[in-house]
Amino acid sequence: AQSVSQHNHHVILSEAASLELGCNYSYGGTVNLFWYVQYPGQHLQLLLKYFSGDPLVKGIKGFEAEFIKSKFSFNLRKPSVQWSDTAEYFCAVNRNDMRFGAGTRLTVKP
Amino acid sequence: DTGVSQDPRHKITKRGQNVTFRCDPISEHNRLYWYRQTLGQGPEFLTYFQNEAQLEKSRLLSDRFSAERPKGSFSTLEIQRTEQGDSAMYLCASSPVAGASTDTQYFGPGTRLTVL
């Protein structure tokens, strides 16, 4: 079945640690890939997206993601997290409709 | 605030009652989406509109659910004969005129439904 998998349910890091959140999808063909973030008490908002070109995509707040087609992956990274990055992160794939992963809750300890 | 708005933000109802939610998209966005999100899960696609036309419906959208977008602006989602399993956050999103799958979807705050 077509799906989006996020490997980590809950990640806890200290400030300044590096972050990598995994995302794999099982769709074939051309896909458009997104990372959304939901800060506590706020709406889902776009962090970054990829649909063509350079597979290394830079987003807001120092986040980046790398599309690796051969691995069906679109992992999210940040070299140094801050307390304000505490949020839930969702990977999504859009073909005809948007399919989301289950989300990864990130807690950054000050 | 020119973002996507949803009303009400919270709804508590008894099993068997009908409920209706409203979504106002960002002005001039011609695509409007409905999602359902339960605890510990990502949003699940329910349906979407391009202008007034409902173009796709998920299998999650049983015959108790109906959505409309009569004038291509705001949309309503109605759930008839609610069940406890309908308890969830119902999210609305809109995307710009191009309506392509590369478009960013802008989400509203959601309506949290609790069915007792």
Image: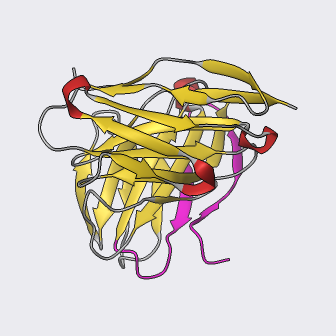
Quick check: B30 above or below A26? below
Quarter of the picture holding the N terminus of chain A = top left
Tell me if residue B50 can be seen: yes
Quick check: A79 above or below B53? above
- Write the start and end of the magenta stretch as one range: B1-30
Residue at left offset 56%, top offset 33%: B16
Q: Is residue B29 magenta?
A: yes
Q: How many marks?
A: 0
Q: Is residue B21 magenta?
A: yes
Q: Residue extending furthest right?
A: A110
Quarter of the picture holding the C terminus of chain A = top right
- Residue A30 lies left or right of residue B13; in this view the side is left
- Residue A27 lies left or right of residue A104; in this view the side is left
Quick check: B39 above or below A64? above
Tell me if residue B43 can be seen: no
Q: Please state the horizontal and vertical placement of residue A50, each as a whole percent of the image.
A: 33, 51
Snapshot quadrant of residue B44: top left
Q: Residue extending furthest left?
A: A29
- Judging depth in this view, the residue of A76 and A26 nearest the camera is A76
Instruction: Give the colouring mode of the picture.
Output: secondary structure
- Judging depth in this view, the residue of A3 and B71 nearest the camera is A3
Residue at left offset 31%, top offset 77%: B97
Residue at left offset 37%, top offset 72%: B96
Q: Please state the horizontal and vertical placement of residue A100, each as a whole percent of the image.
A: 41, 36
Q: Please state the horizontal and vertical placement of residue A5, each as a whole percent of the image.
A: 39, 22
- Judging depth in this view, the residue of B40 and A20 nearest the camera is A20
Q: Please state the horizontal and vertical placement of residue B81, each as a whole percent of the image.
A: 50, 37
